[in-house]
Image (spheres, rainbow, N blue to C red):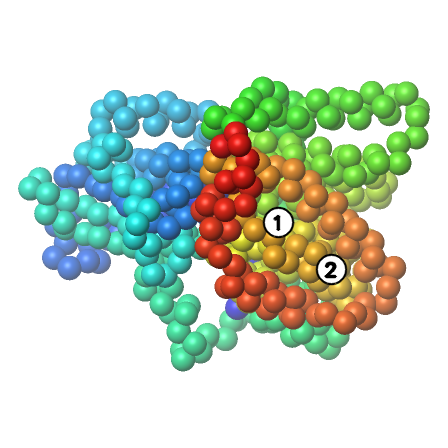
Amino acid sequence: MFLSVFDLYKIGIGPSSSHTMGPMTAAARFLEEILSGNWPKPQASEIKRLGASLHGSLAFTGVGHATDRAVMLGLAGYLPAEIDPNKIDEIISAIKETGQVTPEGHPAYDFDPKIDLVFDKKQALPGHANGLSFSAYDGEGRTLLRRVYYSVGGGFVVTEEELARLDNIATPEPAPDVPFPFKTADEMMAMAKKSGKSIAAMKRDNELCRISETELNAKLDGIWSAMDGCIERGMNESGILPGGLKVRRRAAQLAERLDERRLSNKFNPLEANDWLNVYAMAVNEENAAGGRVVTAPTNGAAGVVPSVLKFITKFHDNIKPEDIRTFLLTSAAIGGLIKHNASISGAEVGCQGEVGSASAMAAAGIAAIMGGTPEQIENAAEIALEHHLGMTCDPVAGLVQVPCIERNGLGAVKAVTAASLALMGDGEHIVSLDTCVETMRQTGRDMDEKYKETSQGGLAVNVVAC
């Protein structure tokens, strides 16, 4: 198993990594497939019209998660990391007005969202709750090419064939060509003990098999810069978030109040928690508005890791750039284990897989830069994840707003608390991180579908306003 830190931390746009970034990426992959000619009787020149069908969670909450817009943008040739959020409305309007998409390197294709984009709530695709298909038709309406994709969380997208290979336990995984190929927390701890290296150092060595140290440091710094920039934008914006719930942005106002309190010189025992909430809410308000965010490991949980990292740079006097890199490398190691052995997809395991995973990652990161041993770091991640077990994903009106925005703040608070508890111990504990991850996987498997990002249960149906 090798998941790069940059697989888990990807720069993109809101409001959802699985429902926005994933479908956009899938559409781009379909365009690549058209040009590749790697399909039976390729007749790319005869393609006149494109179509898309959303299934499962993508169908139920796709409008609130902007999946329809993501598909249009992807078929127009745009990628999440590259598109300017300020130009999205203009691009969408042009597609709706012309009934066409004009991706670079392709002819113009007919695509009328009212006809060619289907929200199929009756038929789920078998591979994953987030399934979607794309089709290409000739001028007579005959299907020339059809491909199915699954958006499996965190912006990751796989084809039917790729998913089948991942699920085929009879086919062993190839041994990764990295020096520390840990697939479980127990393996990670054993390798740390044998090598004498920290978790961050082992993760760094694995990354250096792919890129140079200079490039690695620059990309890590770029991820933190994007996270920090998102926090700053969120703390300087006000108004009502889109979607119809009329949720007000609060981060900017809360930050202003905290600054006023500080000037009064009155002791505020809640200041640390207050700032954690402000930072996390700032990110997730930006995400809800469709702004630029970093998956950490998903968009719905994008505020937890940046909040904790911003918090430690604010309240600790001696944080250096290398500390921030240590945080990101350590947290990515934990996130990779969770994704590999369970899931980070709310549509698959509920919000325990999103905010729970993010909290575990953040707890590990802060424990690492506070001098924690590998045992204490693993303990911190376990504590944070354990106390998110069973958390459902029940977004009101299918929007990544309620309870998602505040939930990120609470996930950040739990992460800091978990790290503090672990650092005060010696690393010994009853429940291992591997056990906790497996429990999360089993809990997600047993969880009713209505609590897994379909907006058919929980708060989504009990809040009158929806």
Task: Bin the neighbour count of mark 1 within 10 Å (Cα to Cα): few under 14, some 14-19, many 20 and up.
Answer: many
Where residue 59 appears, x then y in whole percent? Answer: 36, 44
Task: Bin the neighbour count of mark 2 within 10 Å (Cα to Cα): few under 14, some 14-19, many 20 and up.
Answer: many
Q: Which residue is mark 1?
A: 355
In three-dimensional space, the C-alpha distance between marks 1 and 2, rounded to whole angstroms, equals: 13 Å
The circle drawn on residue 158 is none
**Left or right of 462 in this view: 93:** left
Kindly identify the amino acid type of the residue bearing the numbered disc 1.
Answer: Val
**Left or right of 245 in this view: 166:** left
Where residue 424 appears, x then y in whole percent? Answer: 87, 59
**Is 233 located above or below residue 416 in the figure?**
above
Q: Note whether residue 361 is visible.
A: no
Q: Which residue is mark 2?
A: 383
Quadrant position of residue 246: top right
Where residue 321 appears, x then y in whole percent? Answer: 73, 45
Quadrant position of residue 333: bottom right
Q: Nearer the viewer, residue 314 or 453?
A: 453
Who's the residue at 39% across and 24% down the image? 89
Q: Note whether residue 243 is visible.
A: yes
Which residue is outermost to the left? 140
Kindly identify the amino acid type of the residue bearing the numbered disc 2.
Answer: Ile
Q: What element does badge 2 sit on?
A: helix
Where residue 335 appears, x then y in whole percent? Answer: 60, 58
The reply to whether callout 1 and callout 2 are in contact (CB within 8 Å) is no
Who's the residue at 72% across and 70% down the image? 431
**Is 65 located above or below residue 436 in the figure?**
above
Q: What element does badge 1 sit on?
A: helix
Q: How many marks?
A: 2
Who's the residue at 57% across and 26% down the image? 247
**Is 176 located above or below residue 85 in the figure?**
below
Who's the residue at 86% across and 64% down the image? 425
